[in-house]
Image (spheres, rainbow, N blue to C red):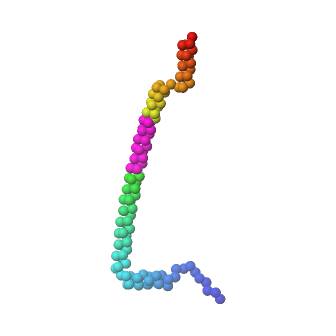
């Protein structure tokens, strides 16, 4: 005949768990509590340093974005200045230099006027 197992808490299992805890306390004693405190202190310290680093990263990111915006504005201004200077030079060259075809027509007209 097979034995039925029930899901009732096993007092022997609880007993063994408490015995293990008792043995652990005997072996490590106060040291385990000290280790736990030290680990908690380290954890809090790491969390604080993580927060400081995250804040620093955010500050650097914001400064970089501002620098990029400033650089972009400066580059756009310089490009606009170069375009204006280029257009001014192109206009002055256009005024100084006569188109060859136009010069040819003017010379032909001048030659016809001279010959007539």
The image quadrant of residue 36 is: bottom left
Q: Main secondary structure of the magenta part?
A: helix
Residue at the outermost bottom position: 1
Q: Is residue 61 left or right of residue 6?
A: left
Residue at screen point 46% across, 33% down: 86
33 left or right, relative to 99: left
Is 44 situated left or right of 95 in this image? left
Nearest the eye: 2 or 99: 99
Is residue 66 in the magenta section? yes
Question: Where 64 sits versus 41, above or below?
Answer: above
Nearer to the camera, 102 or 81: 102
Q: Residue at x 35, y 69 (%)?
A: 41
Q: In the picture, which quadrant includes the N terminus?
A: bottom right
Q: Position of residue 29 (x, y in %)?
A: 36, 81
Indicate the quadrant containing the C terminus: top left, top right, bottom left or bottom right.
top right
Q: The magenta stretch spans which residues?
A: 63-82
Query: Magenta includes 6?
Result: no
Taking the image as drawn, is residue 73 in sight? no
Q: Is residue 116 visible?
A: yes
Image location (x, y in percent) of residue 103: 53, 22
The residue at 35%/72% (across/down) is 38
Residue 113 lies, with reference to residue 90, above or below; the image says above
Provide residue 48's location: percent of width, then percent of height. Answer: 36, 62
């Amino acid at each position: 005949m097979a034995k039925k197992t029930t899901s009732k808490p096993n007092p022997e299992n609880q007993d063994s768990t408490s015995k293990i805890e008792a043995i652990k306390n005997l072996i490590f004693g106060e040291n385990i509590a000290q280790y736990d405190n030290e680990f908690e202190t380290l954890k809090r310290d790491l969390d604080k340093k993580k927060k400081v680093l995250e804040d620093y990263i955010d500050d650097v990111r914001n400064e970089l974005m501002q620098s990029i915006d400033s650089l972009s504005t400066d580059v756009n201004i310089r490009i606009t200045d170069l375009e204006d200077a280029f257009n001014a030079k192109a206009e002055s060259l256009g005024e100084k230099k006569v188109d060859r075809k136009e010069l040819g027509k003017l010379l032909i007209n001048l030659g016809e006027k001279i010959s007539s």
